[in-house]
Amino acid sequence: MKANRATVLTFAEKCKNILASNWQGHLNTIKADAKGSKNDIYTSKVKYILRKGKPYIWVPEKELHNVNMIIDERGSFSVTTPYPGPLASLLRSIKKLPARVALTGDVVPHKDEKSATESLREIIFSEQNAIREFSYTVSGVLSSSNIHDTSRTENLKTLLEADEEYVIYKFNPRSCVFIDGNGSTHEVDFEDMNSSKVDRLAPLSAKIIDGINQSEARRRALMLFCLTYLNANAKDAYMLSIDRKGFNVLGKVSTPISKEGPGYQWKEYRFALKEEARDVETFCRQLVEMEEEAIKHVSSCSGLG
């Protein structure tokens, strides 16, 4: 289960998945007045969709961004990997940041708003349709998730149903940086970004992560994974991120005894899947198989098998 190049994604693939898994990000534009651009930055959270590898951003008409971009098209856009529900509280408590993508480039008005809106409708429809057709295995994993916090469709639907008017922009990136959970930055080549494919499970990753973390039984299974596959005795565990090659878990493990006595720390562990998960069904099936395998292993070791 040790991570290597074959079992982890490239930085470009990670960036593509993060952009595909979220539906909101922070847009930054340069504040402007009648004399032109200034150095102050205006930031707000906006919703977006990924279309042909580029973010299409819905900006409320009242936002200052619309004035800023008349004077200066330059902007930046940052998106984090989903960290819903109890995972958000845990990350704040241990002062760990979720992995994120930072793009710089030009924010230009999208003239064909009708086509962008149709793409938005298609995304919502296809995701709703996929969820209805999921097997019992997938539904079991997703059943504990909080629909309002983790459903991309529920959050994107507000763009169609709200009384508020929006201006749609296309973000044309010039640079891309991947920032990991430790704050280290990694520049990403655009050729790599363009050639990278989005995991088919990325759009539903927030629901999967939260469905696991909201279930005590599935979190106990993560603890068994740490013990069975990595010989790490975790007292608690949360799913941190998922992709087609595997998943990352935060495990609460004991630290060496010090003057203050025994303590605990949260460590990140990487688990590789036996086969690449081409879709949500494959990922959840393998997760359940790993749970069953880990339970059998622990039972046999304790003489209960």
Image: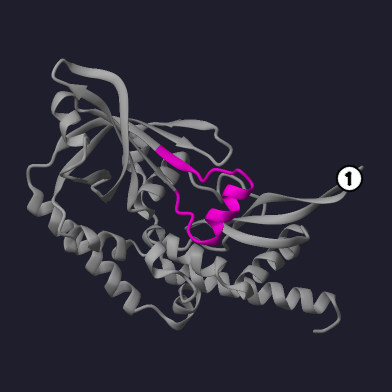
Q: Tell me what residue is drawn at x 81 percent, y 78 percent.
A: 300
Q: Quadrant of residue 253?
A: bottom right
Relative side of 1 to 248, left or right: right
Q: Position of residue 252 (x, y in %)?
A: 72, 56
Q: Position of residue 81 (x, y in %)?
A: 45, 49
276 shown above or below 93: below
Q: Is residue 91 magenta?
A: yes
Tag count: 1
Question: Dot 1: within a 10 Å radius of its alpha carbon, few (fewer than 14), some, or many (20 or more) residues?
Answer: few
The secondary structure type at the circle numbered 1 is loop
Residue situated in front as seen by the camera: 296 or 223: 223
Q: Is residue 236 magenta?
A: no
Q: Position of residue 148 (x, y in %)?
A: 37, 66
Residue span colored magenta: 81-101
Q: Quadrant of residue 59?
A: top left
Q: Report whether residue 217 is seen.
A: yes
**Which residue position holds label 1?**
260
